Amino acid sequence: MNTVADTAKTLRESIRVPDALRRFAPHVRLYKNGVERCGACPKCGDGGKGESSDRFYITVDGKACACRKCHTQRMDVAGMVAWLLDVPMHEALDVLNGHTQAPSVVTHNVHSEVSPVTDTDSQTSDWRALAAQRSQQAHERLLGDTETAASARAYLTARGLTQDTWRAFTLGYERAKVPQSTVWSPAICWPVTHEMTGETVGMRYRFLETQHVQINGKEVRYTSLHGSRTSGRLFGTKLLCDTVARYKCLVITEGEFNAMSVWQACNVAGVDVLSFGSESQRILPAWAVQVASHYSAVVTWLDDADKARQVSAQLSQAATLRSLVSEDGKEDANVLLLAGTLGGLVQTARLHAVQTEQRASVLWDLWDAWRAGELDAGQVQVGKQLAHALGKCDTWPLTRVVVGGSPPPTVQCDATITRHLREWVSTDTSNVSYLC
Ligand SMILES: [Zn+2]
């Protein structure tokens, strides 16, 4: 059996720095300067020199790299990934190991020949089994409607999330230790699962109450179960359905609550979701790029402009959304879910991303979900416009369209989307101000 050291050695020898750089920092463009490849640094930038910057370089053999400005010591491929992702070396090796096993499509059926990526580090299968059990107990505690979990149930309900959603994402209730303190505080929790094996590799917590502890000047809102290995993992993997992905839309977003909101509003109408969660990862792991390529439409909703750019560079085609920030705060997916207009926005962005000839399949998704009683007013409106545009008005019973209701919030979109939306909504502007 391979030892950790063997695996690390093999990874270091088999993956070249330029290949890993393309995966983990796809925005970096290098050029040849004599024998080395060089360019702007993925970490500290170009120093104002733009394309001609050469502070970051990869050695001629492709086995090491360094930045003359911020990391003069040479790094091998594992060192570079640890540096780029800001994770400990063992996690970098885990990510790289996933990288070598990918590409593999996410599937619900765990293939027995796929060994868990995490076997290469210190997390044991016992840890994972216990974490899975703990997560399940916390889930039952939340659903059990007990006095103890009442605050958690009230918190989720106030954020507009229904019990179906709690079940889908295995939300639970537990007290968690507040980092850098001795206090235990009530929290919503959920398992972090591995996309290939389905194993529980971590547990995340969102505290219900404001904590007085600050880390890097920010109030602590999230924490993980000690021993969790969440690097390279995304939120929502268990709910992806790869068999019909080619007809569906994938939304890539940030934050677990935003992801659950999108899922709740649009899943029945053909939208899957993947989220960076509350982690600080800035790029998609290779497996997620692969997964996204199976969808007929990809929409990203990332509010940090740099991160949005990096993620878009990893995807062949995607529509992009951004939350509008007003004086009342950020109008993110959860805020729009509460306003009843989230679905309309997501489906419109989807129409922007999808090939023209596939628009009809979006209409059938909306139609089916409407018949199942699962469409919010915004999606009904999009469906109605789409039926008009495709000349299928007879199919959509316009008399039952729900129009009006809460004051329309605004969402900031790319100029291209705005233009596209005008096209779709030009025949009826009575309740479409939610579309930019
Ligand atoms: Zn640098």
Image (cartoon, rainbow, N blue to C red):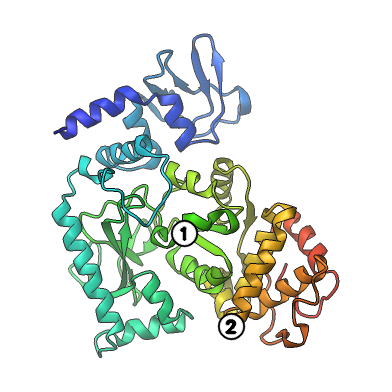
**Which image quadrant is residue 427 in?**
bottom right
Q: What secondary structure is marked by label 2?
A: loop
Residue occupying image coordinates x 37% and y 21%: 64
Question: Measured along the vertical axis of the image, is residue 259 above or below residue 145?
Answer: above
Which dot marks residue 215? none
Give the residue number, with chain letter if any, for mark 2: 373
Cβ–Cβ below 8 Å for labels 1 and 2? no
Q: What secondary structure is marked by label 1?
A: loop
How crowded pointer 1 is (Cα within 10 Å; few <14, some 14-19, many 20+) is rated as some
Give the residue number, with chain letter if any, for mark 1: 241
Q: Position of residue 129 (x, y in %)?
A: 18, 59
The quadrant the N terminus occupies is top left
How crowded pointer 2 is (Cα within 10 Å; few <14, some 14-19, many 20+) is rated as few
Q: What amino acid is labelled 2 in the image?
A: Gly
**Which image quadrant is residue 210 in?**
bottom left
Residue 125 shows in the view:
yes
Q: Earlier in the sequence, mark 1 or mark 2?
A: 1
Residue occupying image coordinates x 24% and y 30%: 8
Q: How many marks?
A: 2
Q: Residue furthest right?
A: 427
Q: What amino acid is labelled 1 in the image?
A: Cys
Residue occupying image coordinates x 38% and y 37%: 99
Q: Nearer the viewer, residue 366 or 14?
A: 366
Question: Measured along the vertical axis of the image, is residue 243 above or below residue 48?
Answer: below
